[in-house]
Image (spheres, helix red, strand yellow):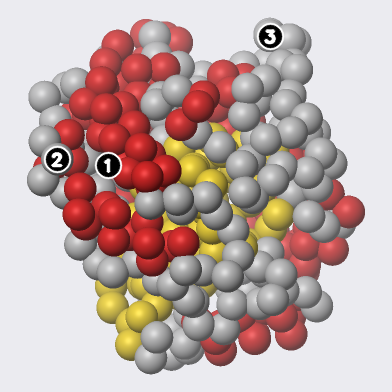
Amino acid sequence: MTPAHRASRGLTRRHVVGGLAALAAVPAAVLAVRAIGGDETPAEATSSPGRAASAGPGTSPAPTVVTQGGGPVPFRPGRALLGAYLGLEGKSLTESLALRRSQLGRDERIVHVFYDFTDTLPHVIEGLPAKATPMVSWRGCPLTDITSGASDALIARAARQLKRQDRPVLLRWGWEMNGDWYKWSAARNGKDGQAYVTAWQRMHRIFAEEKATNVSWVWSPNWNSDPVAAWNTFAALYPGDEYVDWVGVSGYNLHRETPDKLFAGIYRAYSARKPIMITEVGSVDRGGRTKADWITLFARWVEAHPGVGAVTWFDTDTHPGYEEKWRIDTDAESLAAYKAMAASPRFSG
């Protein structure tokens, strides 16, 4: 997705431009091609594993899923960590976490925060529940800034900062690299998927040299690729099993997409190799029970897909440039559906 994300900095907060703001600027006709399943051409729907085509039941066998993995943040079979990016109008992160605890009767198990590439990454996160895992989404940069070695010192500093956390950390660097809206995407770096892979591997090596052994690496493409091209597929951008602990994916119900449309492609491609994390997800509210029903549908999809080991909701009403309010409590029915999901054994990770 392309939202402007609000990242906590102790007592201060500032906006970090992300994917949803860029999506808001995309012409409606382009969005129709990218996101509405019935309007995709056969070539778009099938030529790239980065674009998940709608598939009827039984069109492909269910993959055998991993039973372990995740690195320092381990995958637990049958359990999914449930957390969120929280950016609630007029509330600090600590206050937002307290509100959700009171509404849901439980703490977030993942607390998702966003940082710019040149920011000092956090060694502590405000209000983090005792049993929660932080997920740091760290924005990228033009890939030559990394592959040339020019950013080695900055990367080493980031590794040392995350190493200071008193718990395992999920690191989601350079997400949605298969879109065309970020400066670290293959589309903006010579249409060269290998450049992204090389940058990722270099960063991974520097973290290893700094002995940041508490970091789990989350590789997180968008659910579909834009543009659709051989250099922009999941496979072309995947850093390799030894460099990835979790495979993530961003997907939003913007145009009546089902969870299967959004997430089945990445699941089929990687759940036999790596645990799957839904790293950004939310649903448009079209009135009535539309949002609540989609949350329930999503919960059932996760129940049916044992390789999913974590979900982080995009729970916010603060990002600029986009009218939709993604928070889970926009109405009583949606909050009740989310609360039921959070209370289920599947999300007790």
Give the secondary structure at mark 1: helix
For the residue carrying disc 3, how many other residues have a C-alpha within 10 Å: few (<14), some (14-19), or many (20+)? Answer: few
Residue at 67% over, 35% down:
69
Q: Place residue 237 in its image quadrant.
A: top left
Q: Check if mark 2's residue and mark 3's residue have beta carbons within 8 Å.
A: no
Is residue 190 positioned above or below 136 on the image? Answer: above
Q: Percent position (x, y) of residue 90?
A: 43, 90
* Circle 2: residue type: Gly
Of the image marks 2 and 3, the number of the one nearer the N terminus = 3
Q: Which residue is mark 2?
A: 149
Position of residue 167 measured from the top left corner of the image (x, y, whole percent): 60, 65
Where residue 68 sits: x, y (%)? 74, 33
Q: Residue at x 78, y 55 (%)?
A: 349
Q: CA distance from mark 1 to mark 3?
A: 32 Å
Which of the two residues, 341 or 76, is positioned nearer the viewer here?
76
Q: Is residue 338 left or right of residue 274?
A: right
- Mark toward the viewer: 1 or 3: 3
Check disc 3 and report the residue beneath it: 60
Mark on residue 314?
Answer: none
Q: Return the disc, 1 or 3, that comes first in the chain's sequence.
A: 1
- Between residue 151 and residue 118, name the one nearer to us: 151
Frontmost residue, 243 versus 272: 243
Where is residue 221? Give x, y as percent. 42, 35
Q: Which residue is mark 1?
A: 28
User: Residue type at mark 3?
Assistant: Ser
**Circles 1 and 3 in contact, beta carbons < 8 Å:** no
Residue 203 visible in the displayed image = yes
Q: Amino acid at mark 1?
A: Ala
* SS for callout 2: loop
Q: Of 86 and 26, which appears nearest the observer?
A: 86
Report the Cα–Cα distance between label 1 and label 2.
40 Å
